[in-house]
């Protein structure tokens, strides 16, 4: 593994293709006997060990070749496709992933773990990882296509979000009324598009996040911020490791912190277009919704709302919540929230560590207006940039996500998670 790149790659790629043939010769994962499951597990383990040894040495060379020595910027999904095409056997092929994505989570082969091995080692390398993270800050093609019409109208309605420009503020309203704004692949795509548009709109100076009114029977007519990850979608196999878990973290969440990377008139003063953001919490911010609150410059909450990050109960890692929550509330409280499932009510003594202002639910609209006015100042953007640089340097973030990439993939295919999401789906 320490010698010539091509000589090191050849047996690893061959082993990857051999593993794919062995797995294809077995029945589908759900139909395998215990002996067949054990054989499949041993086959995959051998391949993963070899790939990790290779990538620990050669991931930077792989990435440089895929990006033409950093001259091209493939986003994560494109990078995985390019790696499978240019280096067959190193990561699962697009055809294998298409078949895998059509299965419920409990019936998958777990090929996303092989993707995670590759991406984690890319992120571990300072040059490659920084390049990939900066690439994920670029506007999506969808946002660029929608930008002219949005700039003209100041309004955009997608399945999961409504974007409206009012008095210099971009109001992003989450609109998954049927699922309490629980997140899935579609919502990640829609919200990243809206975040890009808000950042690219020269008439917008402040961004506002809020949940819309629900049609869900329990909360009909009430606003809800977010119920977190959509466990039904996870059970059905529709939450992609690359297009949901990784894209969410490296895409729109990171853009809220660092802005969007695009050529602009002020590029010489700073490479990204950044703006301050405000969040208003109605009812609750659970899981992924709670993670979101850790990003914003000002967080408002209705007095009857609460914050909860039940990662241990769901069995997965709450994105960068582990990375950011300790900074916000301290080590002991972060462990109680993440490991023990403690929730923080807006009226509790600890609420000030998570919410900047708690108001009566009927006063939240006025509080949003006040917050927007306070953030709408030329000095705010420069100061938030320096605060974020001190709180969350890109290098520390890169190293966190290098480890998160693999650990989250492993969690998605662990027996406890598969059992929990199956029970959740069965309960309706």
Image (spheres, rainbow, N blue to C red):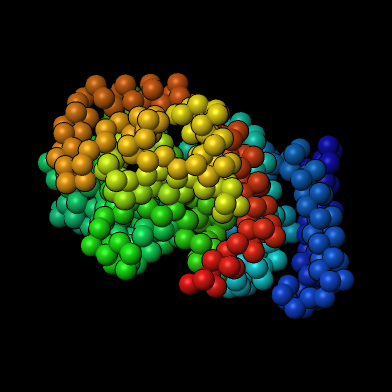
Q: Nearer the viewer, residue 367 or 395?
A: 367
**Taking 77 as reference, is 261 above or below it?**
above
User: How many tags in the picture?
Assistant: 0
Judged from this view, the residue extending furthest toward the left is 167
Say if residue 63 shows up in the picture: no
Q: Is residue 309 left or right of residue 203?
A: right
Q: Is residue 337 left or right of residue 218?
A: right
Q: Nearer the viewer, residue 239 or 262?
A: 239
- Name the image quarter holding residue 33: bottom right
Q: Position of residue 237 (x, y in %)?
A: 57, 67
- Name the image quarter holding residue 203: top left
Q: Position of residue 428 (x, y in %)?
A: 48, 72
Q: Position of residue 229 (x, y in %)?
A: 47, 56
- Residue at 29% x, 46% y is 304
- Residue at 16% x, 42% y is 363
Q: Position of residue 174 (x, y in %)?
A: 31, 55
- Residue at 54% x, 37% y is 336
Say if residue 299 shows up in the picture: yes
Instruction: Classify the position of the N terminus by image quarter.
Output: top right
**Taking 90 as reference, is 205 above or below it?**
above
């Amino acid at each position: 593994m320490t010698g010539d790149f091509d000589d090191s790659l050849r047996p690893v790629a061959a082993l990857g293709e051999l593993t794919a043939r062995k797995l294809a010769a077995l029945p589908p994962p759900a139909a395998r006997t215990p002996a067949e499951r054990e054989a499949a597990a041993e086959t995959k383990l051998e391949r993963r060990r070899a790939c990790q040894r290779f990538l620990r040495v050669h991931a930077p060379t792989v990435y440089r070749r895929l990006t033409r020595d950093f001259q091209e910027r493939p986003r994560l999904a494109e990078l995985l496709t390019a790696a499978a095409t240019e280096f067959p056997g190193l990561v699962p092929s697009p055809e294998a992933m298409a078949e895998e994505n059509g299965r419920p989570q409990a019936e998958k082969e777990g090929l996303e773990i092989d993707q995670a091995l590759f991406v984690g080692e890319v992120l571990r390398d300072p040059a490659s990882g920084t390049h990939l993270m900066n690439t994920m800050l670029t506007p999506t093609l969808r946002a660029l296509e929608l930008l002219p019409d949005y700039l003209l109208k100041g309004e955009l309605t997608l399945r999961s979000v409504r974007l409206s420009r009012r008095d210099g503020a971009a109001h992003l309203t989450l609109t998954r009324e049927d699922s309490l704004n629980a997140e899935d692949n579609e919502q990640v795509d829609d919200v990243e598009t809206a975040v890009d548009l808000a950042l690219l709109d020269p008439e917008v100076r402040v961004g506002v996040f809020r949940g819309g009114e629900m049609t869900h029977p329990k909360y009909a007519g009430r606003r809800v911020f977010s119920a977190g990850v959509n466990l039904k979608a996870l059970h059905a196999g529709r939450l992609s490791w690359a297009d949901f878990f990784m894209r969410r973290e490296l895409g729109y969440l990171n853009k809220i912190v660092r802005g969007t990377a695009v050529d602009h008139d002020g590029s010489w003063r700073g490479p990204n277009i950044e703006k301050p953001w405000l969040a208003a919490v109605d009812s609750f911010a659970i899981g992924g919704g709670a993670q979101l609150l850790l990003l914003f410059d000002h967080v408002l909450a209705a007095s009857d709302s609460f914050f909860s990050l039940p990662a241990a109960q769901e069995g997965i890692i709450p994105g960068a919540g582990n990375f950011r929550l300790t900074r916000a509330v301290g080590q002991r409280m972060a462990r109680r929230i993440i490991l023990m499932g403690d929730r923080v009510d807006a009226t509790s003594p600890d609420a000030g560590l998570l919410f900047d202002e708690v108001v009566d639910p009927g006063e939240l609209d006025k509080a949003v207006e006040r917050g927007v006015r306070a953030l709408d100042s030329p000095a705010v953007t420069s100061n938030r940039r320096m605060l974020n640089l001190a709180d969350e340097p890109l290098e520390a973030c890169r190293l966190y996500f290098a480890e998160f990439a693999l650990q989250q993939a492993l969690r998605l295919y662990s027996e406890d998670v598969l059992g929990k999401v199956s029970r959740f789906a069965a309960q309706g």
